[in-house]
Image (tube, rainbow, N blue to C red):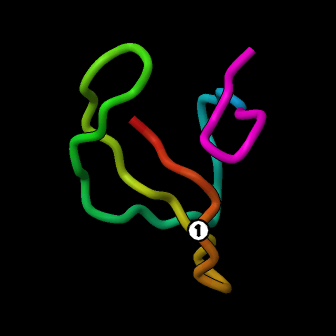
Amino acid sequence: SFQGSQGRAYLFNSVVNIGCGPAEERVLLTGLHAVSDIYCECCKTTLGWKY
């Protein structure tokens, strides 16, 4: 079970029709990680992030 800043989170291996923002360092529960926001390629809505 994963928890994000806005509620339940999901872990998956592949996805389509997303874009990635620039990587930045963020402190997560497991330590410091380089993460990138991901967004919908069609409407540009931020969907979450990847690391």
Which residue range is magenta in the image?
1-9
7, above or below 29, in the image: below
How many residues crowd around disc 1 within 10 Å: few (fewer than 14), some, or many (20 or more)?
A: some
Task: Tell which of 10 and 30 is nearer to you.
Answer: 30
- Which quarter of the image is occupied by the N terminus? top right
Residue linked to disc 1: 46
Expressed as whole percent of the image width and height from the top left, the position of residue 27 reads 31, 31
- Which quarter of the image is occupied by the C terminus? top left
Q: Is residue 5 magenta?
A: yes
The image quarter containing residue 46 is bottom right
Majority secondary structure in the magenta region = strand
Expressed as whole percent of the image width and height from the top left, the position of residue 24 reads 23, 50
2, above or below 48, in the image: above
Mark 1 is on which residue type?
Thr
The residue at 71%/34% (across/down) is: 9
The residue at 24%/25% (across/down) is: 32
Helix, strand or loop at label 1? It is strand
The image quarter containing residue 16 is bottom right
